[in-house]
Amino acid sequence: MTAVRDATPLDADDIYRLLSGFVTSHRPDRAVFDDATFPRVVEAAAAGGAEFLVAEEDSCVIGYLLAVRMPTLFAGGTVLELLELTVAEPLRGRGTGAALIRAAQARAREAKDVEVTVPTRRAAGFYRALGFHETAVHLKWSTT
């Protein structure tokens, strides 16, 4: 059975492994992950500025979700934006990603977020099946 819980510092190795198989536009650097990004994300989640969740089966982390909470003017409150969601490839299609999304949606309701958004190009059908609908095009500008 899959359980969803908050990520902890002890999950770093498992999350890095999943991250390495997830990213398409950036290559993760383990030293940067360990020294900067992972601790900051764990801290932001503990302070309520993010949701950082893991899915586990038999005490093994098989997926994670990272979403950031942003105050907005246009929505009249905070918006929770899903930035990362991945499940170990051999375990995909069994509902783990949906369980992580449902947990994030429940957290958004508790936090009184106005909406949950997700920029995606590869998984629109997955999110539509979970009640999301398209509202905008997502563009980015990179500093590098």
Image: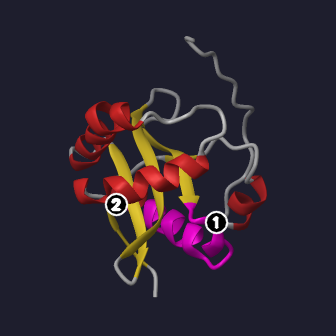
Give the left or right position of residue 15, taking residue 129 as reference.
Answer: left
Give the left or right position of residue 63, taking residue 131 as reference.
Answer: left
Q: Where is residue 119 in the image (x, y as percent from the top left)?
A: 64, 40
Residue type at the position of mark 1: Glu
- Sooner in the amino-acid sequence: mark 2 or mark 1: 1
Q: Where is residue 103 in the image (x, y as percent from the top left)?
A: 44, 67
Q: Which one is in front, 33 or 82?
A: 33
Q: Main secondary structure of the magenta part?
A: helix
As displayed, is residue 13 above or below residue 74? below
Q: Identify the residue at image location x=68%, y=58%.
A: 127
Q: Identify the residue at image location x=57%, y=12%.
A: 144
As displayed, is residue 116 above or below residue 4? above
Q: Position of residue 120 (x, y in %)?
A: 69, 44
Q: Position of residue 36 (x, y in %)?
A: 29, 31
In front: label 2 or label 1: 1
The stretch drawn in magenta includes residue 96: yes
The residue to which callout 2 is attached is 110
Between the C-alphas of marks 2 and 1, the distance is 31 Å
**Numbered range of the magenta stretch:** 87-107
The secondary structure type at the circle numbered 1 is: helix
- Looking at this rendering, what residue extends furthest in the top direction? 143
Q: Which disc is residue 119 wearing? A: none
Residue type at the position of mark 2: Glu
The residue to which callout 1 is attached is 89
Q: Identify the residue at image location x=55%, y=54%.
A: 85
The stretch drawn in magenta includes residue 24: no
The secondary structure type at the circle numbered 2 is: helix
Q: Which one is in front, 18 or 113?
A: 18
As displayed, is residue 94 above or below residue 46? below
